[in-house]
Amino acid sequence: MTDFNPAPETTSIVSVTDRVVKVALAVPAAAVHFFGDVAVFVGTEENVTFASGEGEANAVAVNSGGILCSASDGKRIVLGGDGGKLVSVDSKSNVETLATDAKRRWIDNVALHADGAVAWSAGKTAYVKAPKGEEKTLDVPSTVGGLAFAPKGVRLAVAHYNGVTLWFPNMGAKPEFLEWKGSHLGVVFSADNRFLVTTMHESSLHGWRLADSRHMRMTGYPARVRSISWSVGGKFLATSGSDSVILWPFASKDGPMGKEPLMLAPLQAKVTVVSCSPKEDIFACGYSDGTILMVRIEDGAEVLVRKNKGEPVAALAWNARGSLLAFASEDGDAGLLPL
């Protein structure tokens, strides 16, 4: 795959900063999810904050310590922390403990399946709990870096050092192994289940075409890729890691192999988080200087959501209708943009 070079900085864009509704958080948020039109900001410690479109905020205690990971299916949010507890919170603020690690190890990865199954990891062990409560475990060669359920069927991708293990917890078959040297930290399936992509400790992505395990190298980043997001329909994979948003094309049967990525929304700051709209070919992106933009993929047109304020953007998310955008920065600033 051909390396890319940063694009020049753009000049002027439309601003909607005056439409942002501020949200007061008790502690900075590391992630944000939605229950309908209610944004739920996941704090770095102890609580989550529910916020309506009017900015009214309500904090709910969910953990006794640091929150390390979260995932949501729109019906519940599952969180793991440094106290070894896996908990869930629903739209009515009900908190339930789903599992407790016997060794009180950190739970630092979590994933949800559409049928209600939940997966999490502690150290080198991955766990899957079925909707009816049955629990299965899998040990992998090194510390788990990321988890992802396949879109169809309960197949779990477990990223770790030197590759990804594909596990069918409901079957007795031996797990499959996709090998690529290096430390694999995050993992995602494409919505059509044709591709699997990992973020790496190195400044690159790696992918496989699942039909034949063919490799896909996506390199050239100046920094580690910490945030990725599929565009609507899975045509592009938007990524952080540069001073532009890098979008790899996945519409064809070969994915990005032999193709150049798009490079949109260049600034004199690093992209820290990206989030694609679930309804339109647009994405939101946050930068290390606090700037937030919305960008149309077709022509790169930009809208300013938040001016640079010095602290990096930590979280971005859309509601399912694509009518609300939520954001949070590392210094605890947060807001909602109705569209």
Image (spheres, rainbow, N blue to C red):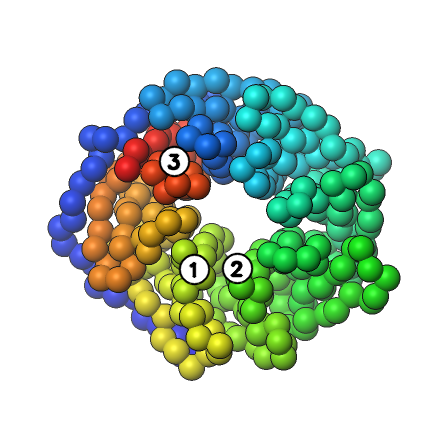
Labels 2 & 1 near each other (Cβ < 8 A): yes
Which marked residue is nearer to the observer: mark 3 or mark 1?
1
**Which x, y percent locates residue 190?**
53, 62
Residue under circle 2?
191
Give whichever of discs 2 and 3 has the lower sequence position. Answer: 2
Given the image, on which type of amino acid does mark 2 rest?
Ala
Q: Residues within 10 Å of mark 1 (few under 14, many from 20)?
A: some
Tell me the residue at 86%/62% (across/down): 172
Q: Which residue is mark 1?
A: 233
Q: Is residue 170 above or below residue 14?
A: below
Whether residue 256 sits left or right of residue 107 in the image: it is left
The answer to which quarter of the image holds residue 265 is bottom left
Q: Residue at x 27, y 30 (%)?
A: 20
Image height of 35 relative to 269, above or below: above
Residue 37 on image: x %, y %: 42, 30
Amino acid tagged 1: Gly
Q: Quadrant of residue 54?
A: top left
Q: Residue at x 74, y 33 (%)?
A: 98
Residue at numbered disc 3:
326
Q: In this rendering, does residue 202 appear at all?
A: no
Q: Is residue 49 above or below residue 190?
A: above
Task: Decide if residue 270 is on the left or right side of residue 129.
Answer: left
Residue 299: % across, % down:
22, 62
Please identify the quarter of the rendering in which residue 92 is found.
top right
* Helix, strand or loop under label 3: strand
